[in-house]
Image (cartoon, grey):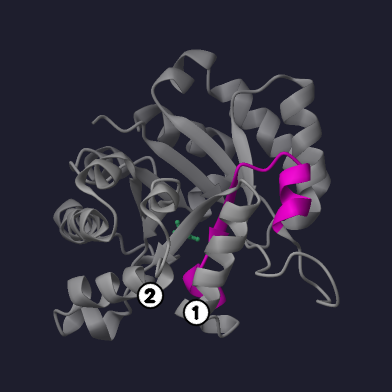
Amino acid sequence: MSRKPLIAGNWKMNLNHLEAIGLVQKIAFALPAKYFDKVDVTVIPPFTDLRSVQTVVEGDKLLLTYGAQDVSQHDSGAYTGEISGSMLAKLGATYAVVGHSERRTLHGEDDATVLAKTKAALKHGLTPIVCIGEGLDIREAGNQVEYNLEQLRCSLQGLSAADIAKVVVAYEPVWAIGTGRVATPSDAQEVCGAIRAELAKLASDEVAAGVRVLYGGSVSSKNVGEIVAEPDVDGALVGGASLKGEEFATLCAIA
Ligand code: PEP
């Protein structure tokens, strides 16, 4: 089964809503419509930008989509500071990132929370981008495959094959995020290939063949081509390089 690559730009806590409008317009200007037949492009701005991004995307009939950096595991109620899946769906969001390493390390999110958020995203019709990835100590000990598969199993535990089919998995080695130290294409393939084999065990060969597995960690226009050329790498989750319109558009065009 051929999988359309996905490039997702995670803006993290950068850009106010006016800057967001400017960046989306820049990306759209630099990325002609013909590219969207070959690659799906999404931006993942801060919550406060989503309404403005929606207005530009819908008003200008842009082909790119947008998503959220997180989603609450709860539907509504006394959860100060949280944003629910239904709120995001109402804003036209397509994706919700769950389990980003910055949420796991800075906000103490564990696999059980990631699973609850994955379920919440699916419940509200959002596509969860489920992030997993090993730290440097695990990589240096050579335990990266085993570690990532355990995170994957815990983050998808109990989901039906039909739900697993709706998920995007992002393999993001923590040592590569924001460091400029990108994994080699074969490092990325090793883990992404193992993820796909595990998805086949958790769901089926058919489901595994259709799920997009992304690589994330210091991806730029300079290295995206060789990374997405690997058979089990179906795109990238991009942080720093997604904040520059032309660079991000070039990266998407190469993918
Ligand atoms: C990320 O935020 O998910 C990420 C991969 O960041 P960067 O591309 O800057 O390493």
Residue range of the region highlighted in magenta in the rendering: 85-103
- Percent across and percent down for residue 124 are 66, 51
- Percent across and percent down for residue 97 are 55, 58
Q: Quadrant of the N terminus?
A: top left
Residue beneath the point at 19% across and 43% down: 230
Residue 168 can be seen in this image: yes
Above or below residue 186? Residue 207 is above
- Percent across and percent down for residue 76 are 81, 66
Above or below residue 173? Residue 165 is above
Q: Which residue is mark 1?
A: 112
Residue beneath the point at 78% across and 43% down: 90
State the SS at label 1. Answer: helix
The numbered mark, 2 or 1, whose residue comes first in the sequence reads: 1
Above or below residue 152? Residue 253 is above
Q: Residues within 10 Å of mark 1 (few under 14, many from 20)?
A: few
Q: Give the number of the disc on residue 16.
A: none
Is 171 colored magenta in this rendering?
no
Above or below residue 117? Residue 142 is below
Label 2 within 8 A of ligand 1 by Cβ = no
Q: Which residue is mark 2?
A: 154
Using the image as rendered, state which of residue 211 and residue 162 is in the foreground: 162
How far is the residue under mark 2 from the one under mark 1? Answer: 7 Å
Q: Residues within 10 Å of mark 2 (few under 14, many from 20)?
A: some
Residue beneath the point at 74% across and 61% down: 84
Residue 133 can be seen in this image: no
**Residues at discs 2 and 1 in contact (Cβ within 8 Å):** yes
Using the image as rendered, state which of residue 148 and residue 49 is in the foreground: 148
State the SS at label 2. Answer: helix
